[in-house]
Amino acid sequence: MSTATRFLENAPRHLFFTGKGGVGKTSLACAAALRLAEQGLRVLLVSTDPASNIGQVFGVAIGHRIMALPGVARLWALEIDPQAAAQTYRNRILDPVRESLPKTVVDRIEEQLSGACTTEIAAFDEFTSLLADSTLNRDFDHIVFDTAPTGHTIRLLQLPGAWSGFLESGPGDTSCLGPLAGLDKQRAQYKAAVNTLGDPEQTRFVLVARAQHAALMEVARTCDELVAIGLAQHHLVINGLLPAAEAGQGALAAAIYQREQAALAALPKTLQALPCDRIALKPFNLVGLGALRALLDDTVLLTDPPGDLRAPAPTETLATLVDAIAAGGHGLVLFMGKGGVGKTTLAAAVAVALARRGLPVHLTTSDPAAHLDATLQGATAHLTVSRIDPEKEAARYREEILATAGIALDAEGRAALEEDLRSPCTTEIAVFQAFARTLEEARTAFVVIDTAPTGHTLLLLDATGAYDRESARHRDPVTPTQTPMQQLKDSHQTKVLVVTLAETTPVLEAALLQADLRRAGIEPWAWIINSVVHASDATSPLLRARAHRERPEIARVLQEHAGRVALVGLAREEPIGLARLQALVGDNLAGPA
């Protein structure tokens, strides 16, 4: 497979690489910056990814300063720390009012400003200065960004004015109102930055994905969201495709190749119209200048040493986790993780395994990309399946807030509130309120949930009293019960499983998720590392080289992040249907059909 790099042809000054964790956007951004520099152009590589590892890619500590990268003329790099930027942003808003407002109000606002939306806007606050800096525009021909702002963040910045009364009135029940409180002083700079993002002569968005149906659907939604706000200059890169030559190197490689080709044949309509490059899966670690050159040039051959392909010990299997869960007889089981790691499949597999033990199970999801009926492809005794529609729940929640908190706002304030209520945090709050109505079932049965709220959302709900209000509507006045937050913190009733892949970025993102949950007082019960090559029957040389690369990531999870870790092998066939889901668990238990 020859590597096309049309996404670099006639490149504008600004290139934004965006995509889910683990798809390779950091590697591609680094390789693109290196290629442009080696073409004689002066390039600045900037990362705003919380799980940034561009310093690791180049083998040098970078940090929050522009520095020349050794060994490459005309290439500089900068890592913006989103968490540090968010703290600076919060301090800028809160410091002037800490003495004038009650501590309870300040604490509430601080949690309001702890979500993903604040982090995104704070990072945007940092890199808009790069877009507007006349010195940088003079010194660099290109600025390459690893991670682009979301459509929600851009819409926030397109609003006509800041919410001047926010700090005095408090955030109420809304989710992301706080971030806008600090925008007013730099509104002209933000407006110029948004205009730059929308100008195809100045900016191009490179959408990076893998050849997986769910991942491609997610990229299509991202593309639609950006087009809706006027950002239409997109280029698609399908990364990590198994070369056709490997398809003859064993049954697993053949199955993966066929699966990827089927996903490409069913490319979502939104993506079909985009210019597209396809980049082959590499057998080597994408670290160092040689590897980055080889990523975009198939004539450069590199290999990793074969190494030890055995999994680091001690690890478990999905079957041992199911046995431990089943021993409790009932409870809440939450599957959490970033997009594309296989949460839906694993949640369905565990639910089926529990049901086949004769245990009552309710499997539910709020993931827009999850299609449980298509995953299960059949019914089994003791298993009930439902789906919470995030759009409907969010619409209901927005109507409730607009009818209360928004009733006294003027037109501009109401417009701002309406945009705030489109945020991901709002959807999480609305969905969790819907989930809360099913939590009582976990006292007598298993409730398995695919896609759970983040720690920030849980803290925000707890701070606003939404838990108590919601639970009070359903509480038996005679028999006291726990609130949903108390239930989530109770390790005897709730088991949180963090799902990831044996790759650098997904592991870092899972660790950040775990830290977020711990801040809310919730301790994950176990990690599941999904689609592990060396836990499968790989015979392809390329796949065996990939298996070698997985070992340090698995070791890192065991040593730094989790005491209980299960490995799930890369499946030969897509795990769809009851039989394949049972095989994924390794569950040969005879049970009701």
Image (tube, grey):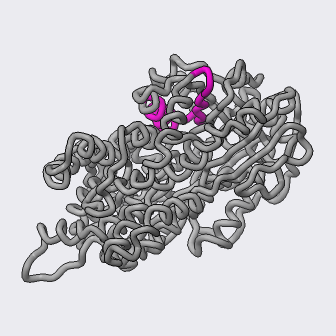
* Residue farthest to the right, as pictured: 71
> In the image, what residue occupies the spot 49% across and 39% down?
188
Question: Quadrant location of the N terminus?
Answer: top right
* Residue farthest to the left, as pictured: 478
Task: From the top left corner, tell me how far across and down residue 485 is, in percent.
Answer: 31, 72
Q: Quadrant of residue 589?
A: bottom left
Tell whether 336 sits left or right of 355: right
Count of numbered circles on the image: 0
| Res. 17 in view | yes
Tell whether 172 sits left or right of 35: left
Of residue 485 and residue 310, the one placed in the foreground of this image is: 485
Q: Is 500 included in the stretch rendered in magenta?
A: no
> In the image, what residue occupies the spot 92% across and 44% down?
71
Task: From the top left corner, tell me how far across and down residue 114 is, in percent.
Answer: 44, 63
Task: From the top left corner, tell me how far across and down residue 87 is, in percent.
Answer: 53, 64
Up/down of 2 relative to 477, above or below: above
Task: From the top left corner, tell me how far across and down residue 85 is, in percent.
Answer: 57, 58
Tell whether 90 sits left or right of 362: right
> In the image, what residue occupies the spot 47% across and 49% down?
185
- Which residue range is magenta in the image? 200-224
Of residue 92 and residue 272, the one placed in the foreground of this image is: 92
Tell whether 39 sits left or right of 160: right
Up/down of 426 relative to 460, above or below: above
Q: Quadrant of residue 489?
A: bottom left
Q: Quadrant of residue 38?
A: top right
Up/down of 430 relative to 93, above or below: above
Of residue 446 and residue 504, the one placed in the foreground of this image is: 504
Of residue 395 and residue 495, the one placed in the foreground of this image is: 395
| Res. 358 in view | no
